[in-house]
């Protein structure tokens, strides 16, 4: 199965369509799932569990920098928190 993300159109019956008419920028991507029985959340968790380590490093750096400006720390998204 092709697991490479590809650009996609938003479904015409999607609830988000009405909010996009005034959007300056948006994009949509899709990827085929190996397991079509999984829910959207389960697919998200499976993808997040494969997040590269450098993404967590970037989030840590981001959180340290924005703290100087009083912005919210979004935390990291380590796969260990996602284990069921």
Image (spheres, grey):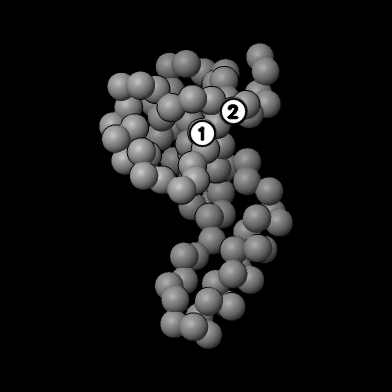
Q: Is residue 36 left or right of residue 51?
A: left
Which residue is identified by label 2?
7
The residue sitting at 48% across, 36% down in the picture is 44
Q: Is residue 80 above or below residue 59?
A: above
Seen at 55% across and 72% down, the residue is 63
* Residue visible at 54% across and 61% down in the picture: 76
Above or below, 20 relative to 38: below
- Left or right: residue 12 versus residue 47 is left
Nearer to me, 37 or 28: 28
- Residue 20 location in percent, x, y? 37, 39
**SS of the residue under disc 2:** strand
**On the image, which quarter does residue 1 sit in?**
top right
Could you tell me if the residues under marks 2 and 1 are in contact, i.e. CB atoms within 8 Å?
yes
Q: Quadrant of residue 40?
A: top left
What residue does disc 1 label? 28
Q: Earlier in the sequence, mark 2 or mark 1?
A: 2
Percent x, y of residue 16: 33, 35
Q: Is residue 70 left or right of residue 18?
A: right
**Label 1's element?**
loop
């Amino acid at each position: 199965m092709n697991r490479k993300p590809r650009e996609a159109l938003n479904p015409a019956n999607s609830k988000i369509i009405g909010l996009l008419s005034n959007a300056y920028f948006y994009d949509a991507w899709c990827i085929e799932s190996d397991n079509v029985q999984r829910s959207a959340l389960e697919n998200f968790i499976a993808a997040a569990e494969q997040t590269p380590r450098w993404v967590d490093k970037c989030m840590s750096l981001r959180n340290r920098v924005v703290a100087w400006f009083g912005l919210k720390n979004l935390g990291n998204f380590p796969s260990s928190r996602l284990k069921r």
